[in-house]
Amino acid sequence: MTVVGPFGLSVRDQALEADVQAGLAAVEEGLLEATKSDVPFITEAAQHLVRAGGKRFRPLLAMLAAQFGDPYSPGVVPSAVVVELTHLATLYHDDVMDEADVRRGVASANARWGNSVAVLTGDFLFARASHILADLGPEAVRIQAEAFERLVTGQILETAGPRDGRDPVDHYLDVLAGKTGSLVAVACRFGAMMSGAEESMVNILTQYGERLGTAFQLADDVLDIASDSHESGKTPGTDLREGIPTLPVLRLRARAESSAGTPEDRALCELLAGDLTDDGRHAEALAGLRAHPALEEARRDTVRYAEEARTTLAPLPSCMAKEALEGLCDAVVHRAG
């Protein structure tokens, strides 16, 4: 049994491992090539997060999905590069919105060069992704455009908050489906589609990616509360400090507002509603959430979405690639503890 990809995913087939490793290496080369500019400063800024590493979760999914067709088809690697470039671009913008100081264990672009450079660098990456995408055909352009629209819509809905009468948890899960699930789904769709896989398989893998992407983000929500910066590569409680209500917070609020809510639940909600830019209050809130049952509820939500992703794969033929995709469901759950 060998280890490849994010979270130490185990692959039990040497041929599959070789294909995936070769594909990921080609994606890495493609990312470095796509982020080069005639202006050295732009190259430095654009390659900042590329060189910081990362899980390459989306390219890995594209490589595995391509196994259901011809994994050596010429469009597979460029399509994976497009998806990862898009993801990286959103990270530059997210860090500006969140005022984050750390990303992938290094200083965020906005902390290093300021918000304007970070935003413009994200735009530069979007442009480079579009340039590669143009060579993959109009269908690929349409798919990416639709996913990008969903991604931005999810971000706007998160900023606007739920409309009156809408369950905040349902609203939040819709946000995640747009912000994260859409692009993970495209990674699976592109990998399968570019490999020439049957349309039914492309659809199954797209649905799988949507559910796994949501589980992946829910696991991130749990990690933001439960982990330290060494584990996550980000400052713990970043969303908490910015007042962004992730799933553990929403589960806490629902519990506090219910008949089963306790004075302690309501006190923690009041603390979270206050100014958490103060380090002492932030640490107190973080400790309170780590000890609260709401965190375990969020973990269970993560497991549910991961299991839905696994179930989606059932109609696919048995093979090592399918087994690896099922293994990713386990890996996502493991991240959430």
Image: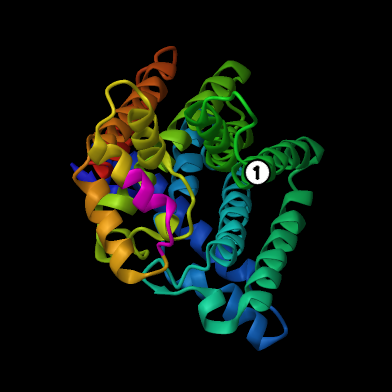
Residue 163 quadrant: top right
Q: Is residue 76 left or right of residue 295?
A: right
Is residue 160 covered in magenta? no
> Which stretch did the figure color magenta?
268-276
Q: Is residue 146 left or right of residue 47?
A: right
Front residue of 288/119: it is 288
Residue at x 51%, y 31% (from the top left corner): 168
| On screen, residue 205 above or below 213 | above
Q: Secondary structure at mark 1?
A: helix
One can see residue 218 in this view? yes
Quadrant that contains the N terminus: top left
Kind of residue indicated by mark 1: Ala
Residue at x 37%, y 64% (from the top left corner): 234
In the rendered image, the residue lying farthest to the front is 263
One can see residue 11 in this view? no
In the rendered image, the residue lying farthest to the right is 138
How far across and down, in percent of the image, does residue 21 sit? Answer: 38, 52
Give the residue number, with chain letter if any, for mark 1: 160
